[in-house]
């Protein structure tokens, strides 16, 4: 899918700023960056959000605001890289059972 979209952007002369989930929890950043290199078009910017969901949304909203203000892809990508990782997401759960089960957390040692 990345290849198809990036090739179309190249053909149309469009800019793309792609802000995927953090590279720490998803392979999309690395995949998109690799495909960008394969396509060979320097107006595609892949920014590691270093966050997920809520933090990612804040970055995308700021990118849209900048786009609507007339900023170009390079300036938007640079600002997203500067802002990435500044959001803090806190989660509260009533149990860690499912995090242990799916391997997100190591099971506690019982002594």
Image (cartoon, rainbow, N blue to C red):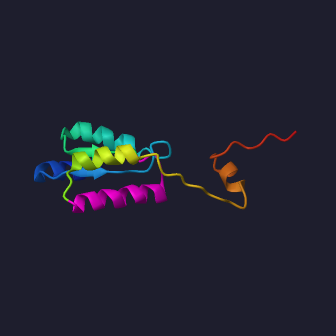
The residue sitting at the front extreme is 69
Residue 93 drawn above or below residue 19: below
Say which quarter of the image contains residue 27.
Answer: top left
User: Which corner quadrant holds the C terminus?
Assistant: top right
The residue under the point 23% across, 45% down is 74
Q: Quadrant of residue 91?
A: bottom right
Q: Is residue 7 magenta?
A: no
Q: Nearer the viewer, residue 15 or 2?
A: 15
Q: Is residue 65 left or right of residue 96?
A: left
Residue appearing at x 53%, y 52% in the figure: 88
**Magenta span of residues:** 49-69
Nearer to me, 87 or 14? 87
Picture coordinates of residue 52, whole percent (x, y):
48, 53
> Residue 5: x and y, percent?
23, 53
Which residue is outermost to the left?
A: 12
Residue sitting at x 48%, y 59%: 54
Left or right of 102? Residue 50 is left
- Image spot of residue 89 (x, y percent): 55, 54
**Farthest residue in the right direction?**
111
For the image shown, how many numbered marks are present on the structure? 0
Is 14 situated left or right of 95 in this image?
left
* Residue 83 at x, y percent in the picture: 40, 47
Say left or right for 57 vs 88.
left
**Residue 63 magenta:** yes
Secondary structure mostly seen in the magenta stretch? helix
Compare residues 86 and 108 and report the one nearer the observer: 86
Residue at image point 22% right, 61% down: 69
């Amino acid at each position: 899918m990345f290849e198809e979209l990036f090739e179309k952007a190249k053909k149309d002369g469009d800019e793309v700023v792609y802000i995927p989930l953090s590279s720490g929890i998803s392979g999309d950043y690395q995949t998109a960056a690799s495909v960008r290199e394969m396509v060979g078009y320097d107006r595609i910017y892949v920014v590691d959000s270093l966050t997920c969901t809520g933090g990612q949304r804040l970055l995308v909203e700021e990118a849209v605001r900048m786009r609507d203000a007339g900023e170009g892809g390079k300036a938007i990508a640079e600002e997203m890289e500067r802002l990435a990782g500044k959001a803090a997401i806190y989660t509260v759960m009533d149990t860690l059972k499912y995090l242990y089960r799916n391997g997100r957390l190591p099971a506690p040692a019982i002594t």
